[in-house]
Amino acid sequence: MASQIIAGVDIGNSSTEVALACVGNGRVEFLSQYLVKTTGVKGTVDNVLGIRQALKEAAGMAGVSFSEIAALYLNDAVPVIGDLAMDVISETVITESSMIGHNPDTPGGTGLGIGTTVQLDELPDTCDGQDYIVVIPEGTDYEWAAYRMNRACGQGCSITGAIVQKDDGVLIYNRLQRKIPIVDEVAYIEKIPLGKRAAVEVALPGHVIRTLSNPYGLATVFGLTPEETKRIAPIARALVGNRSAVVIRTPQGEVIERKVEAGRITLHGQRNKVEVSINDGADIIMQGMERAGQLLDAVGEAGTNVGGMLNGLHQNLADATGQPFDAITIGDLLAVDAMIPVSVSGAIAGELSMESGVAIASMVKTERVPVQKVAQALETELGIPVEVGGVEAEMAIRGALTTPGTEEPLVILDMGGGSTDAAMINQQGNITSVHLAGAGDMVTMLIDSELALHDRELAEKIKKHPLGKVMSLFHMQLEDGTIMFSKTPFSPDVYGRVVIREESELVPLPAKLSMEKVRETRLSAKRRVFVTNALRALKQVAPSGNIKHLAFVVMVGGSALDFEIPQMITEELGKYGIVAGFANVRGTQGPRNAVATGLVLAAAQEVTL
């Protein structure tokens, strides 16, 4: 049979990969490969733009035109969407003793000051027996503020602290005759109620506050009851580790909040229908998944965080695919415990409290119609026949078998951005596969949430690269404790900062993040997602469900390129006597391009037949 050029196209949650090959006469010659970022939701018509770009680049590298490509083969793409379901402890509870707090970068002075809030212009010039915390708005000149406070103190007025809107804390402090703690950079200073009891605390450089970050310290300062002390605990936790803070007791009703419960999930499985509460934590949810058996669908309690999340996933995919809402089902869930930054009610500068929660990745299933729509759209746009070639995991195992030194029986772990797949091929050529929710995108989501970055791109960089701390113009401490010296000076904007060590540049992190905190968050997120999912997936494909019956595991997919994940999984599987490592597809591609390669090989076999 005459040779023809075909392409395997692997649509992933994060990236789309293409493998271009010439097949015929029992031979397969790979010509080129290319990778682009996936456009739109995986498995929807929006993917066409990314596929076209990847094909164009791969064809250009191979020196062929679109008209020379005889056929395209797509993977059977199933979208995986992740989201957070917060725990019920999500916001400060309204009481008569609601609190607000703040931690600026440039406080002035040291110590603890307690008093009644008063505007600078309303500060009394004589002693009236009260202690005052002075509120200084943005339009006030720092020299005038210092002069006004010095004059009042000279007349016997007792000033114990100050709250400043601009970053003038140090400038005002240096001009005061009677030194006091000053907290500045209070953006929403108009929110501060006047005539209310307040406390300002500033610690020495290199130290952290002790009184206002302690619930019992707050109780002492504000005379709280045991019940009130319990309810303001989130405020104290939000201030732990801060160098400075201001806390104000506000009257009942001035801070309004609406509390939304975390909710419950009903798991509809092949064996059982199981109901679990988000408040019980990730372990209980995953135990419920085991009791339910193969998941057919999951429904969240109406009017709760998890209900809104799961219903939103259904609706988003229904909108993207044009299918009815009821036709969308959830085929798998991965739940892991997480810390979630929650806005503090009444905050005066966007303060956050880290609260316990559950992160959930959901695999949303649809009929094959959406992928067929992608195929039809590609055929219309490119004029090339397109077929849906096969299940991702099965195609990945074909691609993985091109790794030198591998043979059947073989188990692969395909770790991408949205899902973790496993497949086993026995000596008879029979393949068993499983497709689970949760992979690299969920790790990024956890890092972004737990470090309160609000920047997914920065979280992605933290996930992919090691850290360092620039100690001088010419040396950097690496996260393993070793010192690296540079022949050229580091950029001044990274001096003294924790940085992400990308291949070609150093990316500085927010000053409040320590290297130890970032590293531990990164490692923990990877373990919770990838190690958990690897064991889950392998258990489902192993004979009799016993992982110890497996001998060899090959890792493929984008996350197998990570500088830590393969080592984590290798170490964990070593406990079961399993030899594990990452693939080298076709002896040249490493763990990449396995599915696209498998699609080409499967198609080539059909062409030969």
Image (cartoon, grey):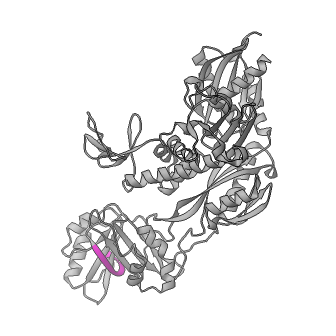
Which secondary structure dominates the residues rendered in magenta?
strand
Counting every numbered tag in the picture gives 0
Residue stretch rendered in magenta on the structure? 111-120
Residue 366 at what x, y percent from top left? 77, 45
In this view, which residue lies farthest toward the bottom?
A: 129
Asked where in the image residue 131 lies, by quadrant, the reply is bottom left
Position of residue 48 relative to residue 196, above or below, is above
Check if residue 541 falls in the magenta segment.
no
From the viewer's side, name the closer residue of 90 and 412: 412
The residue lying at 38 percent from left, 65 percent from top is 241
Quarter of the picture containing the C terminus is top right
Check if residue 113 falls in the magenta segment.
yes
Q: In the image, is 351 to the left or to the right of 395? A: left
Residue 51 in view: no
Q: In the image, is 394 to the left or to the right of 178? A: right
Residue 276 in view: yes
Quarter of the picture containing the N terminus is top right
From the viewer's side, name the closer residue of 243 and 207: 207
The residue lying at 57 percent from left, 48 percent from top is 531
Residue 425 at what x, y percent from top left? 71, 34
Position of residue 499 relative to residue 245, above or below, is above
The residue lying at 31 percent from left, 61 percent from top is 106
Residue 491 at what x, y percent from top left? 30, 40
Position of residue 357 relative to residue 531, above or below, is below
Residue 5 at what x, y percent from top left? 69, 16
Q: In the image, is 314 to the left or to the right of 32? A: right
